[in-house]
Image (cartoon, grey):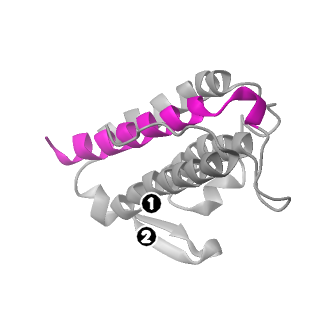
Amino acid sequence: MNTNELITLNFEEVRRRSEKVWRAIPEELLQWRPDENAISCSEMIRHVLEGEFLYHQIILGRGSRALTNISNPFEDRVFTTVDDELEFAKKYRNEFIKYIKTIHINDLENIEIDRSDVGYKRKLGDMLLRIAYHESVHTGQLLSYMRTMGVERPNIWD
């Protein structure tokens, strides 16, 4: 397995587990939040899917400046169901995974992503791992939400 295949596998496995969690949240509880300052389940799912699209733009533009002139397809979209949200995001997900498969191994270390506006600059390889980690963290948060709601949690350690 080469580097691109390993990175792709990591993204696919993170998403597979996220989807198990997202689909296990009862539809009537998608708007639940642990307190008034927290985001709801549906907002967190949207945040992850939209975030991946935005991170892809940041990577393509080599930094946060890439976000200044893009059209965000998630921006005015109303969340309806998990499956609808995943179907909508599929196009953007496929573009991102396709991009990962084209990265030259040297680019992982030689391309710098400038996110000075939020306090860091990272190599492309590091940035890709951060994107997957971002989704993983939110999956963990949703598992905690589900515990608090008293909802059965899926086994993501299969």
Residue 145 magenta:
no
Q: Is residue 131 visible?
A: yes
Q: CA distance from mark 2 to mark 1?
A: 10 Å
| Residue ID at (44%, 51%) | 132
The residue to which callout 2 is attached is: 122
Give the residue number, with chain letter if any, for mark 1: 130
Crowding around mark 1 (Cα neighbors within 10 Å: few <14, some 14 to 19, many 20+) is: some
Identify the residue at horizontal 37%, vertical 36% (top origin). Answer: 12
Q: Nearer the viewer, residue 123 or 24?
A: 24
Q: Is residue 60 left or right of residue 146?
A: left
Which residue in the rendered view is the most extreme toward the front? 150
Furthest residue toward bottom: 119
Q: Residue at x 48, y 36 (%)?
A: 154
Question: Which residue type carries mark 1?
Answer: Arg
* Above/below status of 25 relative to 58: above
Residue 102 shows in this picture: no
Q: Any magenta on residue 28?
A: yes
Q: Specify start and end residues of the magenta stretch as a single range.
A: 1-30
Q: Is residue 7 left or right of residue 14?
A: left
Q: Percent from the top left, x then y, of residue 41?
A: 70, 43
User: Do the residues under discs 2 and 1 have CB atoms within 8 angstroms?
Assistant: yes
Work out whether 102 lies above or below 148. above
Residue 40 at x, y = what percent? 75, 47
Which of the 4 image quarters holds residue 46?
A: top right
x then y, percent, for residue 9: 29, 39
The three-letter amino acid code for the residue at tag 2 is: Arg
> Quarter holding the N terminus?
top left
**Looking at this rendering, what residue extends furthest in the left direction?**
1
The local secondary structure at tag 1 comes to helix
Position of residue 10 measured from the top left corner of the image (x, y, whole percent):
33, 45
| N-term mark: 2 or 1 | 2
Which residue is pictured at 65% across the width and 44% down the height? Answer: 150
